[in-house]
Image (cartoon, helix red, strand yellow):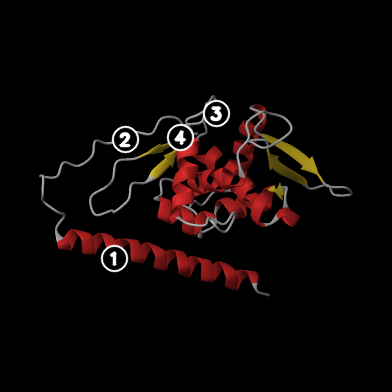
Amino acid sequence: MNIELSSLEARVIGCLIEKQITTPDQYPLSLNSLVAACNQKSNRHPVMDLDEATVQNTLDQLARRHLVIEKSGFGSRVLKYQHRFCNTEFGTFKLSVHELAIVCELLLRGPQTPGELRARASRMEPFADVTQVESTLEALRTRDDGPFVVQLPREPGRRDSRWAHLFSGPVAVPPPAAEPAGVVAPEAAQTGARLERLEEQLRELRAEVEELKRRVP
C-alpha cells in the first residue's frame, strides 16, 4: 500500500466517501459542503474547525496525488469534488461495501472496537452482527495489497481491542498493560470505563439531535 494521508487528508477523503454513500444526490461536494462535512460535530473524532482555505489547500494536495478530482455540474459554475481513493475506474484499489464502510468510519473517527464500528458503520452498510465486522476487519488486515488496518492492544477497562486504519502510516502501538495473573481489573476501573463510554454516546446523541434540528426548516 502506497497511500499515506495526513490527518486533514484523511478527514477530507472520509467525508467524501461518507457523503457519496449517505447522500448520493448531493455528491460530488462543493467546497462549502465539504467544509461543513469536515466540521460536523456528529460522527467525527476529533471535532475540527477548518476554514475554506485549509480545506481547499488539502484538496489541492490530494488532487496533485490524483486522489481527488474536480467536477462541475451541467450549467453550474460551482466546482465540486469527488474522491478517487478507491472503487473508481482510475485504479485497481477496490473495497467491498462492508470494507468501505469500515474504512470510512476509521478515517472519520479513528480507532474503534468492532462493536462501535458495527453501530456506526451500519448507517452506510448494515452488518448482521459483530462477527461480520470482525471478519471484515480481518480481511482488511490480511489483504495482499495491505494491510489496511491493525488491531491495537486491549486497553485496561475495555472488553474489546480497538482497530485503527493504516492509511496515515504505521500506528504507534503501546505495549499492553501488564496485569498480574489471576487478578481482574478493579470494579471501580470497570465502572469508570463504562461511564466514560456512556458519556461519549450521550455526547454523540446530543450532537446528532442538534444536527437534525438544524436540518429541519
Q: Position of residue 213 (x, y in %)?
A: 58, 73
The residue under label 1 is 195
Picture residue at 47% right of the left edge, 56% below the top: 129
Question: Relative to residue 110, is residue 17 drawn left or right?
Answer: right
Question: Relative to residue 22, is residue 199 drawn left or right?
Answer: left
The answer to whether any part of residue 46 appears in the image is no
Q: Residues within 10 Å of mark 3 (few under 14, many from 20)?
A: few
Q: Earlier in the sequence, mark 1 or mark 2?
A: 2
Q: Earlier in the sequence, mark 2 or mark 3?
A: 3
Please, what secondary structure does the residue beneath circle 4 have? helix
Q: Is residue 131 above or below residue 89?
A: below
Q: Position of residue 202 (x, y in %)?
A: 40, 68
Query: How much space separates mark 1 and mark 3, taking CA atoms?
Result: 37 Å
The residue under label 4 is 141
Picture residue at 70% right of the left edge, 36% below the top: 88
The residue under label 3 is 3
Q: Earlier in the sequence, mark 4 or mark 1?
A: 4
Which three-letter amino acid code belongs to the residue tagged 3? Ile
Residue lying at the far top of the rendered structure = 2
Q: Is residue 165 above or below residue 197?
A: above
Query: What mark, if any, has residue 66 been given in the picture?
Result: none
Q: Residues within 10 Å of mark 1 (few under 14, many from 20)?
A: few
Question: Relative to residue 52, is residue 164 drawn left or right?
Answer: left
Query: How much space separates mark 2 and mark 3, taking CA atoms?
Result: 20 Å
Quadrant in which the C terminus is drawn = bottom right
Of residue 112 and residue 109, the one placed in the foreground of this image is: 112
Q: Earlier in the sequence, mark 1 or mark 3?
A: 3
Query: How much space separates mark 4 and mark 3, taking CA atoms?
Result: 15 Å
Q: Is residue 199 above or below residue 93?
A: below
Which three-letter amino acid code belongs to the residue tagged 1? Leu
In the rendered structure, are the residues bearing label 2 and label 3 in contact, judged by CB atoms less than 8 Å apart? no
Q: Earlier in the sequence, mark 4 or mark 2?
A: 4
